[in-house]
Image (spheres, helix red, strand yellow):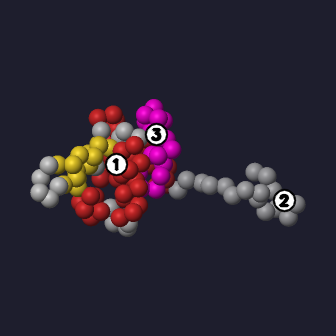
Amino acid sequence: MFARENGTPLRPEYVLTPAGAAVAPACAALLDELRSLGIGDIGLNKWSMPVLAALAADRRFSELRSALPGVSPRALTLALKGLAEAGVVERTVLASYPPRTVYRLADRARSLTPALERIAAAA
């Protein structure tokens, strides 16, 4: 650790809590999986992982909002749009009256599910 002459550190140091240490291996596995899919940037946005975790089953927009307390409609829309552009979420408009939109995990994103479940279980 580097310190100034008065003993204060030049940069903060971060230490994992016991809870953080318990979830760290699952987070490392998730990061590796995100990199292997080539979506590291979009995957680390604030709402991307909660949205992917909520999409364990097919859901409509309103169902996703209910499953994710605290998400604004705009934040959810941006997260879904970014994940769809990255190819990990599929958006299907059903031909019914009124039209319904359903979101689901793309097949290539199913590999993220085990790591997300381990994180949820450790948290």
Q: Is residue 56 visible?
A: no
Disc 3 and disc 2: Cα gap in Å?
Answer: 39 Å
Where is mark 2, residue-wise?
4
Q: Residues within 10 Å of mark 3 (few under 14, many from 20)?
A: some
Residue at 23 percent across and 46 percent down: it is: 92
Mark 3 and mark 1 lie on one chain; the one further toward the N terminus is 3
Numbered range of the magenta stretch? 31-48
Where is mark 3, residue-wise?
39
Mark 2: secondary structure: loop
Residue 52, numbered label: 1
Residue at 25 percent across and 62 percent down: it is: 62
Mark 1: secondary structure: helix
Residue at 79 percent across and 52 percent down: it is: 2
Q: Is residue 41 visible?
A: yes
Q: Is residue 36 magenta?
A: yes
- Please state which of residues 88 and 91 is positioned toward the viewer in this rendering: 91
Q: Amino acid at mark 1?
A: Leu
